[in-house]
Amino acid sequence: MLFYLCDMVHRTVITPENTDSNYWKDVWRFRGLCYFLAWRDVLVRYKQTAIGIAWSVLRPALTIGVFWFIGWFFKIPDEGVPRIIMVTAATLPWQFFSSAFSEAANSLIANQNLLTKVYFPRIIVPVSTVIVCLIDFLISFAILVVIMIFLRYTPGWQIMLLPFFLVLALLTAMGSGLFIAALNVKYRDFRYVIPFIVQFGLYVSPIAFSSNTIFASADIPDWAKVLYALNPMVGVIDGFRWCITGGEMAIATVPFVISMAITALMLVVGVRYFRRMEKHFADVV
């Protein structure tokens, strides 16, 4: 009897039902792995490149130049704000979102050897890639700082709210990236869809133009304005511009509210679908 009681004391029973309750505790417990993967990606991202980390500045700088020229050539209204600031304040959050979304969506395939060897919460892999993209964003933000210093453009108190919209962009990229990452493991066709999504999103996001121009136009039908507002990056970009310009470029209320709702929905759906498919990653990948 005594032997039986001792055996019961030291017995550990692992059941599938316990994984959900302990999952987020495991994520926190493995946070060191997340930092390690992020640091590894930072070290190898620009390894053996001629200009190294300067690509973090050069890539958005080229995009800014292209969209500045498009806005200038087609005489797109700038709402009294220097066009280069209007375009830069939109390009930086878009560049962050597109990079974070693409990297997160492809992260499981890129780390498939790691998935099949050891246990850890798989959500750590896409989260670590988003951290790397956040570092790139902080570096490229120097472009905007230099432009504002050169033009002697001083932002208002709204600049204090910029981290909120950065978090909104991060959550948007995280939600959509988790969903596509889970699909990408089972259906490898999605690796060809991801660049198309990013390219299409670039054209329908307010980078060379503003949302106020879209909603004030009588030539654009109402149904097209509704579809435009469903783009979650519309509210993020409008928010960035509002913060940088000190409120000179007002936030379009309707797309901002819709953007927050879409972001919340994408995050919930992305996390739930990722968690549901996570148990099969090692078998499928």
Image: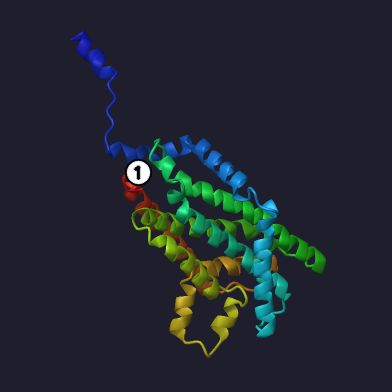
Q: What residue do we see at 51% from left, 55% from top? A: 103
Tag 1, which secondary structure?
Answer: helix
Q: Is residue 28 above or below residue 79?
A: above
Furthest-top residue in view? 2
Q: Residue 8, relative to residue 203: is it above or below?
A: above
For this view, does 157 lie left or right of residue 217? Answer: right
Which of 50 and 100 lies nearest the eye of the viewer?
Answer: 50
User: Could one spot residue 112 in this view of the protein?
Assistant: yes
Name the image quarter holding residue 35. Answer: top right
The x and y percentages for residue 222 are: 46, 84
Mark 1: few, some, or many residues within 10 Å (few <14, many ≥20)? some
Give the percent coordinates (x, y) of residue 22.
Answer: 37, 37
The amino acid at mark 1 is Ala
Q: In which quadrant is the N terminus drawn?
A: top left
Seen in the image, is 121 located left or right of residue 90?
Answer: left
Question: Which one is nearer the viewer's eye here, 151 or 183?
Answer: 183
Please name the residue shown 62% across and 44% down the image: 43
Query: Which is more toward the observer, 141 or 67?
Result: 67
Q: Name the residue rendered at 53%, 51% in the picture.
A: 130
Q: How is the image coloured?
A: rainbow
